[in-house]
Amino acid sequence: MGTITYERPREKMHQKGVKALSNSELLQVIIGSGSAGLPVAKIARKVDKVLKTAGNTVTIADLTSVQGLGVVKAGQLIAGLELANRLVYQQEADSFKDIDILTDLYADLRTSKEQTLLYAFFDGNSRLIDDISIPIDHKTSTVRIARKLFGEALSQSTASVLVAVGGNDQPLEPSMFELNLARDVFSTAAMLSIKVKSFVLVSAKGEYAIKESSRG
């Protein structure tokens, strides 16, 4: 008969990652230790039941009603839950904001009669700093275009950039010029530690993202 081994939550988290832990095990890690006659696993199970019942409306009083859980640990749990809720809300808000920003940025490209290069600059919180649209001159080298783009990005303390090539009749199959430009944009961004949110072709018919691995 095989030996059954018990992994303590903290050890399990280090070996398998935090996602491998159950709710009760996560609570054991946060609570840390039990009290006299009450092991932490038992306290965690009771706290889990309280949280499942009260949800986001849980209070410190709800948590301190669990025997063995003091005001300090209850406060830490409440603070952790509030932070998690704020982060989820912020991520959702940023997602909607990004969609709105992209809709506005791409609107002019979709109706432009000439091929246009758009680049938009974002700060460390993904807030739009500025955007610039210029007609594309295929006689200008893609290296020079990328250098001009990132020269402007550096002057505005940019954390990330979005680059789009578009027009009403923009083909959604990238040309060699567009692949070369994407290559130079990604490589220059990497040297300067600036993130490229996306490099995308935009037309009245839709969008096509050129990935970094697709560089020509």
Image (cartoon, rainbow, N blue to C red):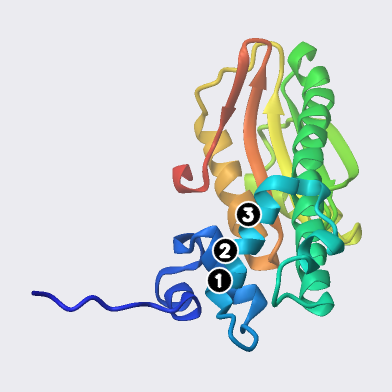
* Front in this rendered view, residue 211 or 139: 211
Identify the residue at horizontal 23%, vertical 75% (top origin). 4
**Residue 27 in view (yes/no):** no
Q: Which mark is residue 113?
A: none
Name the residue beneath numbered marker 3.
49
Identify the residue at horizontal 70%, vertical 33% (top origin). 164
Q: Is residue 155 left or right of residue 106?
A: right
Residue kind at label 3, given as amino acid type: Lys
Name the residue beneath numbered marker 1.
42
Marks 2 and 1 in Cβ contact (< 8 Å): yes
**Residue 179 in view (yes/no):** yes
* Front in this rendered view, residue 185 or 128: 128
Identify the residue at horizontal 74%, vertical 56% (top origin). 84
The residue sitting at the left extreme is: 1
Residue kind at label 2, given as amino acid type: Arg
Name the residue beneath numbered marker 2.
45
User: Residue 85 in the image: x percent, y percent?
Assistant: 78, 51
Up-down relation of residue 111 to residue 187 (above or below): above
Mark 2 Cα shell of 10 Å, populated few (<14), some (14-19), many (≥20): some
The residue sitting at the front extreme is: 37
Up-down relation of residue 36 to residue 89 (above or below): below
Marks 3 and 2 in Cβ contact (< 8 Å): yes
* Front in this rendered view, residue 102 or 193: 102
If the image is split into quadrants, where does the N terminus sit?
bottom left
Residue kind at label 1, given as amino acid type: Lys
Q: Earlier in the sequence, mark 1 or mark 3?
A: 1
Local SS, label 3 = helix
Up-down relation of residue 95 to residue 189 (above or below): above
